Amino acid sequence: MKVVFFEDVEGTAQVGEVKEVKNGFARNYLLPRNIAGAATKDNLQHANALAQKEARRQEKLDAEARTKVERLQGYRVTIEARVGETGRLFGSVTNRDIAEKLNDATQLSIDSHIVLLPEPIRELGERAVTVKFTRNVSVDVTVEVVPDEASKPVVAKFLEEQAAEAAKAKAAAEAAAAAAAAKAEAEAETETETAEA
């Protein structure tokens, strides 16, 4: 069924778009809620007027969001968290924690829902997090998770253990490479002696 949309439907269409949708979706959801209408001349004119109004509203929102983006461009947020003996956090850092830090540091009102974090942060380190103000305006912010004062000795011990394990693994790999090289050299010598005999 061909319909024209009077409202934005996430993942389907925006105001004013004409789309072919399944009959059941149109009859059971879009038409009863007046989200869309049949693609008639009157409905197309009505949707076009709504689309122009929405475009003006969206442009105004984008202009407001761009001022916030300028303040957050290249911004870095440091969050202290408690860390366990395995180097993983007790709990996690969520989009709400990041939004609070950004609000405290920049005096902007950033809702936690616009901080796009696919899954909570559970490890130390840096990562880029997107803050999406509108569908057209977003900015990447660097989030660094560091251990709190109580966890610093635990993290230092963990890092020392990791460095020691890495050194052992490197030494073992070098020894294996040396053994393989010696074996290859010995085989080459036996082939040379066999060829001379």
Image: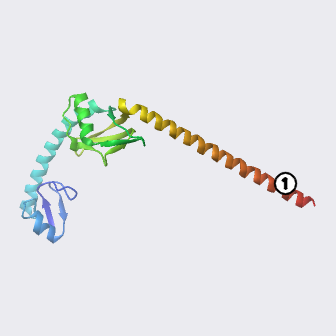
Residue 130 in the image, given as x and y percentages of width and height: 30, 42
Task: Report the side of 156 relative to 177 (left or right).
Answer: left
Q: Would you place residue 56 above or below residue 190 in this image?
A: above
> What residue is at 59 percent from the left and 40 percent from the top?
167
Q: Amino acid at mark 1?
A: Glu
Per the image, the residue denoted by label 1 is 189
Q: Would you place residue 117 above or below residue 189 in this image?
A: above
Residue 38 in view here: no
Examine the image and state in which quarter residue 116 appears: top left
Task: Report the side of 133 relative to 156 (left or right).
Answer: left
Q: Pick whichever, 18 or 160, lies toward us.
A: 160
Position of the C terminus, as image quadrant, is bottom right
Residue 42 in the image, given as x and y percentages of width and height: 6, 60
Q: Residue furthest right?
A: 197
Give the number of callouts.
Answer: 1
User: Helix, strand or loop at disc 1?
Assistant: helix
Position of the N terminus, as image quadrant, is bottom left
Q: Residue furthest bottom?
A: 23
